[in-house]
Image (spheres, grey):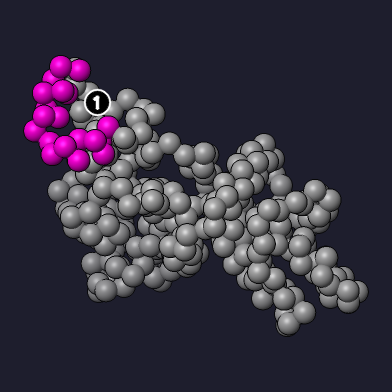
Amino acid sequence: MRQYLRNPSELVLKAFLSRCSPERRSALEKFLPELERLRIQELPSFEEGVTPEGFTNGGILEQVHWSWFLPTLKTYPVKERKLFLTALNPVAAQNLAHSLEITDYSQEMSETGRGFLRQILLNSLLGPKDRLLPIDYLPPSPLKPLFRLSKKELTKLIDFLSLHDLAAEIRQIVETKILKKIYSFLSEDERKFLKQTMAHQKESFPMPRMALERWDGEEESFRHLLHRRGIMRLSLALSGQDPDFIWYICHQLDIGRGNVLYKLCGKEAAAGVATDVADMIIRQIEEILANPEMHL
């Protein structure tokens, strides 16, 4: 059974039962139906100490890429858009103001008004009744290092992943003109990484061909094709993860990339593929964090 079929309320219940003494926990569990009690016992333990404050969703707006607020803000007149910008953090507000062509939005606002507007934005992301498990309380996963990456670094990871597809594709290309053009579009670090990948690539799962022989030869379409492949690989690793884990990663990206990734994560990866790609991702996260100046 895939992990994302778990019941979030049962994870929360387990979290708070874990704060009770063994005697009190045993007494409370007697009020649960037998099947639910057994399911809760089978759930993984939390890696972090559980506190009630940790289960608030107040910090989500700071974790989400600002572009996810655009659809909601565009439904409001300019005067009200400015109020929403005042309620957001300065970086998100500045980017949204630029995108919405708003020049002056700074104004005084009470904490009550700010909280009300932020709740509207949170509801637009989650729904008025839905909640997310905090990142610290997500089920254990080898992909937790993804949360150490900034949006820029996560995008860089996607580009890294795409080069595995390019390495496999280049072996199928015999036309020198196409090969020269491909290499001309790659940075020095990309060419170096591609060379290493081609020398050591031993993938246990087949990926569909990129079919670059049908590519139009333009750099923009080449980059778009590569990036799409990188997102596809990331989705393979994420496909069996907890749904809240997937939500956080998708919303760390801009809304365009995030929506593509979210849809692809709905397709279950073949047995063993998710693990292989996850191992690949972990190695490349270490590379990115160790070499922040690497240009892709």
The percent coordinates of residue 5 (x first, y second) are 32, 52
Quadrant of image for the C terminus:
bottom right
Q: 12 or 79, which lies in front?
A: 12
User: Can I make out residue 129 in this image?
Assistant: yes
Q: Main secondary structure of the magenta part?
A: helix
For residue 152, side relative to residue 202 (left or right): left
Q: Quadrant of residue 215?
A: bottom right
Q: Residue 278 colored magenta?
A: no
Q: Residue at (70%, 44%) from the top-left corner?
A: 293
For residue 98, side relative to residue 233 (left or right): left
For mark 1, give the secondary structure: loop
The percent coordinates of residue 140 (x first, y second) are 43, 36
Q: Quadrant of residue 65?
A: bottom left
Check disc 1: other Cα within 10 Å, few if <14, some if 14-19, many if 20+. some
User: Can I make out residue 248 in this image?
Assistant: no
Q: Amino acid at mark 1?
A: Ser
The percent coordinates of residue 170 (x first, y second) are 81, 66
Q: 131 or 86, which lies in front?
A: 131
Residue picked out by circle 1: 18
Q: Quadrant of residue 49?
A: top left
Q: Residue 26 colored magenta?
A: yes
Q: Which residues are magenta?
A: 22-41
Q: 108 or 73, which lies in front?
A: 73
Q: Residue at (39%, 70%) from the top-left corner?
A: 100
Q: Residue furthest front?
A: 34
